[in-house]
Structure formats: C-alpha cells, structure tokens
Amino acid sequence: MSISTGGRIAALCMGACCLTAPSVSSAVRAELDSRTSAWLYPVVGRDGIAVADTFLLQSRLRLLLHDILPLDEGDADPTDDQDLAAAASLRWFYDFGVGGASDPDDPAFVPMLERTTLDVLFAYIEATNLIGGTLDARFGRLVHSGPLGWRSDDGLLLHAELPRRAKLTLLGGVENLRGLWFSASPFSPDGIERWDVGGEAADRYYRRPERETVRYRPVFQGSVAGRVGPVGYDIGYRHAWKSLDGGTGESLFGAEVDAEVGPVSGLAGARVDLATATLADVLAEASLGLAGGRHRVDVSYEFFTPTFDLDSIFWAFSADPFHEVTAKYRFPVLGPVSGRVWTSFRRVQEGGNSGDAEPVLGPFSDLGGGVGLSLRLARLVSSARWKVLRGTATSLSAFDLTTRVEAASRVAAWGVASIWQYEDRPRAGYHGVGGAGRLGVRIRINPELAVDGELQVAHDPREGTTFAGFLWLDLGAVL
C-alpha cells in the first residue's frame, strides 16, 4: 500500500514533533500522556449469535509541545509574541480474539474487523500571532468542530482576526476517511469508506472497479464567528468533491447563535444540505433561571432528518424525519436533593418505514415525559430517572439509576443499572424488555499514574445476554 497524502502529512508532523523536542537548556514545555486499554467483549450478530470474542489491546500516545520559539523577556505580555507549537496523538490496537477467517461463508467471518491498525488521531504544527497577532495557522491532521459538526481533515487551517471582534476560519485539504493510510477517523462522514481491495473475500464484497484503489476527497470549509452585544454567532460552509468523478460530494451550510440576558439564555442552530436541498436539522433552546439558578425552566424544539454525503451508502436506506418539543423543570426538593420533571411531544413524519404517523394530540404522534431525583454530596453523586414515550410510532419506557462515590482522595467507584421496555412498531418483532448494568472503579496511584476498570452486562431479546470487561492504564508527565 502506498503512503497517502494524510499519511505523509502525519509523518511530517510527527517528525517535526521529534525535531522540536525540548533540550535541557530549552524553554519548551512538553506534555506527554498515554492511555493503554484492554477490552474483552463479544461481537454479536443480528441472529443473536456471538460471531467473534474480541480481546482488544489498545494504546494511545499524545505529545504536546508549547513555546518552541524563545520568548522575548522584554515584552510586557509574552502571550502576544509569535510562537510555534506541535502536537500529535497516535493510537494502536491489536485484536487477539479475531479468529482470522477470510471465507465469508465461515460463521466466524466478520467483515472489516481488522486484527491490528495504527491511527493518527491528530498531528499538526501551529504558528500563532502572525502578521501582528491577527493570524494563526495550523498544518497537518486536524480535528475541528463548529456549526457543521465534528470533522477530521488533512490540510491547512487558518484563523484570522476581523474587525468588530469577529474571526474568519478557512480550511483546505483532503478529508480523513477510513481506508487511507493512518486513517480511521470517527469524525468522517457516515458511509464514506476507502480501502484497498484484497484477501479471499474481496470478490464477494467489493465488485466495483473503483474500490480497488484508495482515493481522496478534496475539501474546503470556511466560517465566520463573533459577538454583537449579548449575541454570539458562528456561520459556516463546507464543500467536498467526490473522489470518483470530481462532482459534488457534500455541500453543507450551518449557523449557530446564542445569547444571554439576565436570567434568560438561549441558543439556536440549523444545518442545510445544499447538495440535496434538504433541511438537515434545527435546534432551538431557551432557559430561564430563577432564585439564583435553583429553579430552572428549559424549553427546546428539535427537527432532524438524516442526511448523508452523496458518496455515502446510507442513501440506500429509508429514514424518518421527526419534530420534537421538550419542556423541563428542575427544582430543589430537600437539602442536597433536587428534582426534575419533563414532557416531550414528538411527530414522526413521512419519509421512511413508518409513514406519516397518526396524530395523538394536535400535530404530535408521540407523547411522553419523565421524572428524576438527584442527590449531590461532597463524595457522593446519585440520580434516578424514569421516562416513557408512547404513540403511533414509538413505544418506550425506561428506568436508570446512576451512582458515583469518591471513596477516598485517590479512589472512585461508580455503578449504573437500567431496565427498559420497547417496541419498534415499524419493524415487526423488535420488542421486549431489556436491561444493563455497569460497575467500575478508578484508582489514582499518584498524579502521573491511574488505573480504571469496568465490568458490563446487558440483556436484550435480540442478542441475549452479553458481557464486557475493560481495563485502562493512564500515564502522564509534564517536562
């Protein structure tokens, strides 16, 4: 396999991190930490049969370098000086439990379940306070967020200060997609996969000739953010080109605003898929705090319709857009105990399997609500919640109990128990009662060393009873 553009960028940034590592006489600040994890769990198929028992060993290493350029001791504010920083995070895992079956007819065969891989989560060089402090530049593998959601791209990111306290952000490069060398990003568009075709199962699963070569998707993104009085805003646009024919793969516009005036605060946002002329989602929330925040009323409206990149396989599946209105009230009960009540109204509209659900109340097809109690002490936090949602498209009720205890200054334990009853009415046979539980502990041996462990069990009529175990080892140092 040849090294991709993302791999070259990541390798370049990793090399820069090594070249700029601090010496004895340097003022460079370095932060180094790692997390090593051991996971043991079954991979369960749709028929409820475990097709693979997974024992996964994963390790993540992160290095941050600050103040690479020497400071001018005569400056009144050193934070205004030009500076250079570097950062990188690598993740490696090996699956000891995969049986290695390559025949799709073998019950142990699990498509795309790799035995080992190396990911570059992020790796970049950053220059700050350029051009009189008006420009910051970051180059490499970048993870960023905004009104268009979380993304991972390989390229150049620029932050420029504009008049009236506004900031312009521009990005250009290629998307970090699964299948490119050193690429396994959770922040790439759903359904966009790129990998080399190989192995005995390739002919059955990947027949299209264009799948035989790893390909790239150029991308451009820009946004403007700032504040006008009490109102903040962030407006962005993203365009990606298909790797196969150069046509539009994604054209997305998004905007967010927020404001706070006295005890009232609110936010609103929307995203529009311009490539398909679809309103992807809308969110509006308002909150009123009373009695110093001890009483709080929240009202929200959400509209969501699944939209995907034009390269995505998920366009082949139907989906149901929905509207939902929720009202919540949080209030004190007694001492450290507080309560919450809420109600929700949902409408599932035509667009998928369920059709246009029959209304139950006004325009709404589903009604629900819930109640919760929370206890908050110095070393104990616990909450219990019950909720129900019923209607022509949904049938769900659930209860959960969560507790976290700081048993000592260096020991913490937590537990979660839940039970639910559900019925997925558009899909016959998807109903029943299930439950799950988690029990974990964290021990901090010293400021640089901690160990976490957790056991999980879950039961569902579709999958039976499954178990999972996790163990984490955290190491960190500031040099």
Image: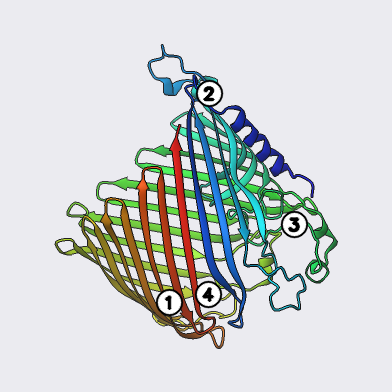
Q: Nearer the viewer, mark 3 or mark 2?
A: 2
Please state, as top left, top right, bottom left or bottom right, where the C terminus lies in the image. Answer: top left
Type of the residue with mark 2: Ser
- For mark 4, give the secondary structure: loop
**Percent x, y for residue 32?**
49, 38
Mark 3 / mark 2, whichever is N-terminal: 2
The residue located at (53%, 42%) in the rendering is: 62
- For mark 3, give the secondary structure: loop
CA distance separating discs 2 and 4? 62 Å
- For mark 2, give the secondary structure: loop
Q: Nearer the viewer, residue 153 or 34?
A: 34
Disc 1, disc 3: CB below 8 Å?
no
Mark 2 / mark 4, whichever is N-terminal: 2
Mark 3 / mark 4, whichever is N-terminal: 3
Type of the residue with mark 1: Phe
- Which mark identifies residue 349? 4
Residue 175 seen by the camera: yes
Kindly give the residue lying farthest to the top in the view shown.
74
The residue located at (82%, 58%) in the rendering is: 212
Q: To which residue does mark 1 refer?
A: 364
Kindly give the residue lying farthest to the front in the view shown.
445
Q: Nearer the viewer, mark 3 or mark 4?
A: 3
Label 2: how many Cα within 10 Å (few below 14, some 14–19, many 20+): few
Disc 3, disc 2: CB below 8 Å?
no
Q: To which residue does mark 2 refer?
A: 23
**Percent x, y for residue 470?**
48, 63
> 276 left or right of 396?
right
Label 3: how many Cα within 10 Å (few below 14, some 14–19, many 20+): some
Q: To which residue does mark 3 refer?
A: 195
**Percent x, y for residue 179?**
71, 55
